[in-house]
Image (cartoon, rainbow, N blue to C red):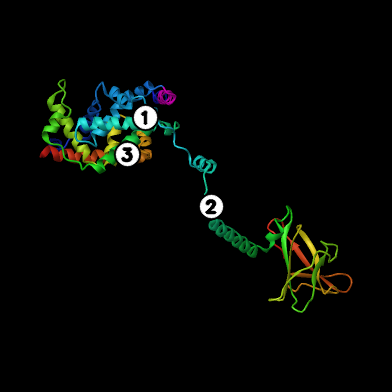
Amino acid sequence: MNTERLTEPSKDELASGLRRLGAMDPGPDFAARVMGRIGTAAPLPAPKRRMARVIGWLMEPRTIRVSPLGSLAAAACLLLALGLFLKINPGAESGRTPAGLSPVTFVLAAPSAREVAVIGSFNGWKAAGWTMRNDPATGLWTLTTALPPGSHEYVFLVDGTTPVTDAAAALNVDDGFGSRNSVLLVKNGDGTAL
Amino acid sequence: MDKPDNDRDDAMAVERTLSGEREAFAVLVRRYQGPVYRLMLRFSRDEHEACEMAQDAFVRAYERLASYDQRRRFFTWLYTLALNLARDRARRVAREPLYRQDLDMTLADPGRDPLASLEAARLLDALRDLSPKYAEALALRYIEDMPLDAVAETLGVSMSGAKMRVHRALHMLRELYGKEGKQ
């Protein structure tokens, strides 16, 4: 212990030595020198927050130069994008789904049919305005609409005379007249249909 | 004056400075010139250089005062700014060891015991050889005489982290200082 004290100071001695360093000071005129360097300048304005910078960028008027060729190219791109969007979202052409309703797509494979409509409890079993669209390449008839949540009975009316149940429906029930109706269950919100 | 009083005074001085009362900033300079100068001494070769660096730190603090978040302690913000400045400078300027004559000149004060001045310079030099992570914990705790919770807050570490750094730094300094003493 004594040998160590001859070569290395104790921690208390070191702490005391460090505390003595706390007396070092840049001198009485230090503040005056700093203030002299600052001069009469005002502090810089606070940097804008990110959102303020974005809003500022959006609000700032700017000049946009458009060449005829450039505008044609832009219009072509816009049309292409719109076409792609409609192709990907076939329901988009009829606008947004009204509040409280869920989008539903009926599909029937009937390549030889001339006309197909959907009739059911949701349209009073009337075909007017519920004609399905045919894709001759696939033979599929489709119709996209929006229905309120709940249970809906329906059939496809082929060529205006023949009711056909939906083979893809999860449920078919007796219609009370010797035939069967398909049942569509529309859930709340996400439009999931059974 | 206790810590909350100090913080309130600092906040008031910052407000007044930002509202155009330049002299209010001089109050902050006088209050913190010692810790900032001593911080720069640990990153510089002599008192003159440390003094210049400390001035740079206060000028930059003044310029950026509007970006200071007044929910934080002013000293923590100032110290972080000064430490960043010192580190940047240390990266640019390769540090050279202090020569004996520099040591004699450093801390030369007619009113002080020359032997004590030399010891202080040796201690400061040993402190410079520590990693800033440890040197700063030790400096804030003993040179600036700050309680451990304030050391932790200033360095942005936990209380136990600050305690560990101070403890290890003291141990490392003891070894370094002992070696220097033997040379």
Left or right of B87? Residue A177 is: right
Amino acid type, label 2: Val
Residue interval drawn in magenta = B7-20
Of residues B17 and B40, the one nearer the viewer is B17
Pinpoint residue B102: horizontal percent, then vertical percent.
14, 33
* Disc 2, SS: loop
Callout 3 crowding tier (Cα within 10 Å): few <14, some 14–19, many ≥20 = few
Q: Which residue is mark 3?
A: B84
Q: Is residue A166 above or below residue B43?
A: below
Left or right of B84? Residue A24 is: left
Amino acid type, label 1: Tyr
Find out whether the residues at labels 3 and 2 contact each other: C-beta distance under 8 Å.
no
Q: Where's the C terminus of chain B, which quadrant?
A: top left
Pinpoint residue B121: horizontal percent, then vertical percent.
17, 32
Q: Is residue A69 magenta?
A: no
Callout 1 crowding tier (Cα within 10 Å): few <14, some 14–19, many ≥20 = many
Q: Which mark is residue A148?
A: none
Q: Quadrant of residue B143?
A: top left
Return the disc, 3 or 1, that comes first in the chain's sequence: 1
Q: Which residue is mark 1?
A: B62
Q: Which residue is mark 2?
A: A66
Q: Is residue B16 magenta?
A: yes
Amino acid type, label 3: Asn
